[in-house]
């Protein structure tokens, strides 16, 4: 196990981030992106799941960027462990295109979102900030892969799902469709010319009306119900 490598906090108000990946170059790249922002600070690094758990206990980060496949305790087990803790950090899984199934399993274990390792810096920062705000995020570049792997190959349930759409208002359907396309709340607010708080309110009502747990399940429902189709 590799011990977490601590870093001094830059400002008292910045969000604290722990990076966990067994590849040093990946950790360096993520550190450069995160530390380039005045509101974000990398407080430590870890090279496996055990070190991540130790780092969370010692450094109390707000967010962990978690790799999936690592020697020793992998990212799935570490995520499940950390998500079972009360008041634990938010977990953003960082994966590669050929490991989508592992990222999806991490979401089921309680992770708050995932993105790809080679995502542009701007996309990484949008996703990091959204997760820190309490949103459950799938990077836009992975939304289609998530749907193709776990929705299109699932047993057909569209008729039953379509009937549930009747519970939503026209604006709520519009918001749900944009969520399914991978837009963050701020981006949806800009698209619809409303405040971000309004978008959050709509999303909360959508989840309540449809009995969905989180944003990820909302994405899946949008495709299963036929509200959004691959290629739209």
Image: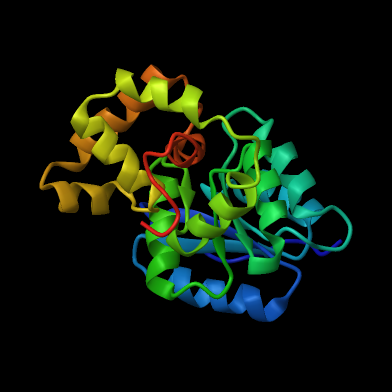
Q: Residue furthest left?
A: 193
Is residue 144 toward the left or the right of residue 76 in the image? left
Give the image location of residue 31, x and y in percent.
54, 72
User: From what the image shows, is residue 87 above or below residue 73?
Assistant: above
Q: Nearer the viewer, residue 17 or 67?
A: 67
Image quadrant assignment for residue 116: bottom right
Image quadrant assignment for residue 30: bottom right
The structure residue drawn at horizontal position 48% and vertical position 32%, both measured from the top left corner, is 214
Is residue 130 toward the left or the right of residue 172 in the image? right
The structure residue drawn at horizontal position 51% and vertical position 47%, both measured from the top left corner, is 62
Q: Residue furthest bottom?
A: 25
User: From what the image shows, is residue 153 above or below residue 123?
Assistant: above
Can residue 209 be seen here?
A: yes
Give the image location of residue 198, x and y in percent.
19, 34
Q: Quadrant of the C terminus?
A: bottom left
Can residue 96 be seen here?
A: no
Give the image location of residue 148, x and y in percent.
58, 54
The number of numbered badges drawn on the structure is 0
Q: Quadrant of the N terminus?
A: bottom right
The structure residue drawn at horizontal position 54% and vertical position 50%, both measured from the top left corner, is 147
Colouring method of the image: rainbow
Give the image location of residue 176, x and y in percent.
33, 38
Q: Nearer the viewer, residue 229 or 179?
A: 229
Q: Nearer the viewer, residue 201 or 218?
A: 218
Q: Nearer the viewer, residue 98 or 68?
A: 98
User: From what the image shows, is residue 156 above or below residue 54?
Assistant: above
The structure residue drawn at horizontal position 43% and vertical position 53%, both measured from the top left corner, is 15
């Amino acid at each position: 196990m590799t011990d977490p490598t601590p870093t001094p906090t830059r400002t008292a108000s910045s969000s604290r981030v722990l990076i966990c990946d067994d590849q040093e170059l990946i950790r360096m790249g993520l550190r450069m992106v995160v530390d380039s922002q005045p509101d974000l600070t990398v407080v430590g690094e870890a090279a496996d799941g055990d070190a991540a758990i130790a780092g969370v206990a010692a450094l109390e980060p707000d967010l962990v960027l978690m790799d999936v496949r690592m020697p020793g305790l992998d990212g799935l087990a570490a995520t499940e462990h950390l998500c079972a803790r009360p008041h634990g950090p938010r977990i953003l899984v960082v994966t590669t295109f050929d490991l989508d199934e592992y990222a999806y399993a991490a979401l089921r274990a309680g992770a708050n979102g995932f993105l790809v390792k080679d995502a542009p810096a701007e996309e990484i920062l949008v996703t990091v900030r959204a997760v820190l705000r309490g949103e459950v995020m799938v990077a836009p570049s992975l939304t289609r892969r998530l749907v193709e792997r776990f929705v299109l190959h699932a047993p057909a349930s569209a008729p039953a799902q379509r009937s549930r759409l009747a519970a939503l208002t026209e604006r709520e359907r519009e918001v749900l469709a944009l969520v399914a396309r991978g837009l963050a709340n701020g981006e949806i607010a800009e698209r619809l010319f409303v405040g971000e708080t309004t978008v959050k309110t709509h999303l909360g009502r959508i989840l309540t009306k449809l009995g969905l747990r989180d944003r990820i399940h909302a994405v899946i429902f949008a495709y299963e119900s036929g509200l959004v189709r691959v290629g739209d």
